[in-house]
């Protein structure tokens, strides 16, 4: 099953990536940075952006974090058993995926939620070939519950799913417009990289993504694009080959 466009959907002639995995944070679904819960306007804004991207004919899969509801690492830091805390974090990502599914489908685009934890009354269990078939049929696929295992981040889950479905790129939409040499919110002279190699990212211990996710992408030559979700049409522009945000690949 290759990343070829569905014959029933006409892909934009300038589409640079026919199938992508988009990773967004749970915070993008709440009303402010560091906020909690789900804000209908924020969820709707993300859904609007995804529908616009879908119209390009791209095969779109999504992984959303759960930090707006519960963070496993924070729970563990407060004395909770790490495995229990991580499972709670996985459930938070399912809630976010269902919220996005509802918003996207109300805008007329079919979706499927697939979870790494079995919960058949809520969503499909993750099956690779079924996920690919959904993409080929023009459905947006939302992967939830991480990898189903504790001690792995949603970044790692995104990298893993991207490779399993044969994505041509991993897009990470963040709060900042790319990868910087230091925190741009704390340092006014921070410099944004337009391009980085996997090895440089790992060597410099840049914190935008965890090392496991980057290593997986490096070993399988999966390019990563990091940009700001709030930037106007950033996902669309990146899909059409524009130089948006920071590219992480083997060339650097």
Image (spheres, rainbow, N blue to C red):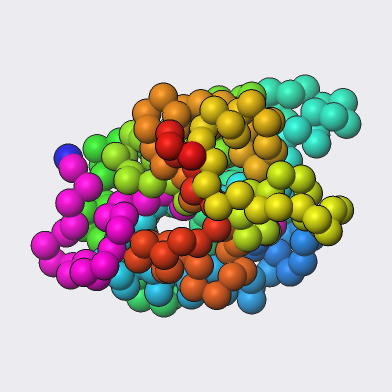
**In the displayed structure image, the side of residue 59 where residue 219 appears, left or right:** right
Q: Is residue 90 above or below residue 236?
A: above
Q: What residue do we see at 80% from left, 36% from top? A: 74
Q: Is residue 212 above or below residue 240?
A: above
Q: What residue do we see at 31% from left, 40% from top? A: 165
* Front one among 98 and 74: 74
* Residue 45 x, y percent position in the rendering: 57, 74
* Front one among 137 and 171: 171
Quadrant location of residue 89?
top right
Query: Is residue 134 at least partly visible in the picture?
Result: yes
Is residue 26 in the magenta section?
yes
* Front one among 251 and 8: 251
> How many numbered discs, if any?
0
Bounds of the magenta span? 2-27
Q: Is residue 124 above or below residue 80?
A: below
* Residue 116 x, y percent position in the rendering: 46, 34
* Residue 107 x, y percent position in the rendering: 41, 77
* Residue 69 x, y percent position in the rendering: 72, 51
Q: What residue do we see at 38% from left, 46% from top? A: 169
Query: Is residue 122 at least partly visible in the picture?
Result: no
**In the displayed structure image, the side of residue 107 where residue 77 appears, left or right:** right
Q: Where is the N terminus found, in terms of image quarters?
A: top left
**For the stretch drawn in magenta, what is the main secondary structure?**
loop
**In the displayed structure image, the side of residue 93 where residue 83 appears, left or right:** right
Is residue 137 in the magenta section?
no
């Amino acid at each position: 099953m290759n990343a070829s466009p569905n014959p029933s959907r006409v892909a934009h002639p300038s589409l640079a990536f026919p199938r992508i995995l988009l990773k967004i944070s749970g915070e993008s679904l709440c009303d402010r940075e560091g906020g909690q819960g789900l804000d209908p306007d924020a969820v709707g804004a993300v859904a609007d952006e995804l529908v616009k991207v879908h119209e390009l004919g791209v095969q779109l899969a999504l992984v959303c974090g759960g930090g707006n509801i519960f963070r496993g690492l924070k729970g563990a830091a407060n004395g909770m058993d790490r495995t229990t805390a991580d499972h709670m974090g996985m459930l938070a990502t399912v809630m976010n995926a269902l919220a996005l599914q509802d918003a996207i489908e109300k805008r007329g685009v079919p979706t499927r939620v697939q979870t790494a934890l079995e919960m058949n009354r809520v969503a499909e269990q993750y099956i690779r070939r079924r996920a690919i078939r959904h993409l080929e049929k023009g459905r947006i696929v939302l992967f939830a519950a991480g990898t189903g295992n504790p001690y792995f981040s949603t970044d790692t889950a995104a990298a893993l799913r991207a490779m399993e479905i044969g994505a041509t790129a991993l897009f990470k939409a963040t709060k900042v417009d790319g990868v910087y040499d230091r925190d741009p919110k704390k340092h006014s002279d921070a410099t944004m990289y337009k391009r980085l190699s996997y090895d440089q990212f790992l060597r410099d211990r840049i914190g935008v993504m965890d090392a496991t996710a980057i290593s997986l992408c490096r070993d399988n030559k999966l390019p990563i694009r990091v940009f700001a979700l709030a930037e106007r049409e950033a996902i669309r522009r990146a899909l059409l080959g524009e130089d948006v945000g920071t590219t992480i690949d083997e060339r650097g």
